[in-house]
Image: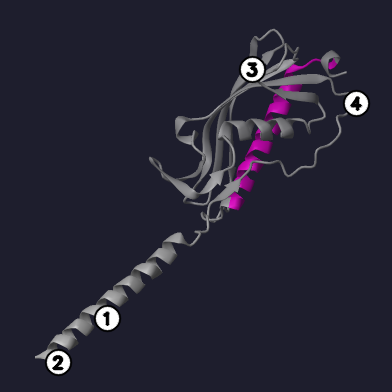
Amino acid sequence: MNRFRHSNSFSILLCLVLSIAGLAHSGCNILKPQVDATRYFLLDSPLEQSNPVTNSALAIGLRRITIPDYLQNTRMAVRKDTNELLFSDYNRWSERLDTGIARSLAKALRHSDLIHTVEIAPWTQPVQHDYIIDVAIIRFEGNANGQVTLVADWEIANGARVTIQRGQFEHIENDWNGTDYSALAGKLTLAISALSTHLAEQLALSSTPAERR
């Protein structure tokens, strides 16, 4: 009888020790620093910034860049189907997307021989611009088929704030593998550069030789 009682007590004690050891081990895992796997990306032109060309005279104001509500968060979007989007928790833009698009577009526009300067609103003081550009982004994402798409409506106004041109631009980059978000950011940057080239072409049609001297 005593032997059974001692054996039972030993079993209880052993279980208690193992339970405490298990809790201690779990506690160590909880307290152990967790590695943040989130990656952050920028839209940035691959081109080197060049010095303004001396005969370039156009001063451009980049007034409004608007994006759809579904792109208002920093998670990068991938279109799975026509009506379905996937947002990555671990691949994010490092800034507001409309801010990043404005910065990247202004940088790309400055590479045009036609343009002397590009200033992004809000302007800290009254500035006289030869032309003002507004851009409304409609689509800006990759998809499950490996395409990266930019669709945008644009308007160009003259220095008197009167709209003189408007249109829509579409650019598609192919061969994205669907998982490399660094490559996705790069292809979207190329799409912004293509938009800047298109806008510069429209400015060339609108401006006069006197403005470009």
For disc 2, the marked residue is 3
Which one is nearer the viewer's eye here, 7 or 136?
A: 7
Q: Which residue is drawn at 18% across and 87% down?
A: 6
Between marks 4 and 1 in the image, the one whose residue lies nearer the viewer:
1
Q: Report the Cα–Cα distance between label 3 and label 2.
A: 98 Å
Q: Report the Cα–Cα distance between label 2 and label 4.
A: 102 Å
For disc 4, the marked residue is 54
Which one is nearer the viewer's eye here, 208 or 83?
A: 83
Q: What stretch is highlighted in magenta?
A: 182-209
Q: How many labels does the image show?
A: 4
Between marks 2 and 4 in the image, the one whose residue lies nearer the viewer:
2
Determine whether label 4 and label 1 are within 8 Å by CB. Answer: no
Question: Could you tell which of marks 4 and 1 lies nearer the N-terminus?
Answer: 1
- Relative to 179, 116 lies left or right: right
Is residue 174 something one can see in this rendering? no
Residue type at tag 4: Thr
Between marks 3 and 2 in the image, the one whose residue lies nearer the viewer:
2
Residue type at tag 3: Gln
Between marks 3 and 1 in the image, the one whose residue lies nearer the viewer:
1
Q: Within 10 Å of the Cα at label 4, are there few (<14), some (14-19), or many (20+) other Cα atoms?
A: few
Between marks 1 and 2 in the image, the one whose residue lies nearer the viewer:
2
Q: Report the Cα–Cα distance between label 1 and label 2.
A: 16 Å
Question: Could you tell which of marks 2 and 4 lies nearer the N-terminus?
Answer: 2
For disc 1, the marked residue is 14
Query: Which of the image's four quarters has the C terminus?
Result: top right
Q: Residue at x 46, y 51 (%)?
A: 144
For disc 3, the marked residue is 165
Q: Quadrant of residue 99?
A: top right
Residue type at tag 1: Leu
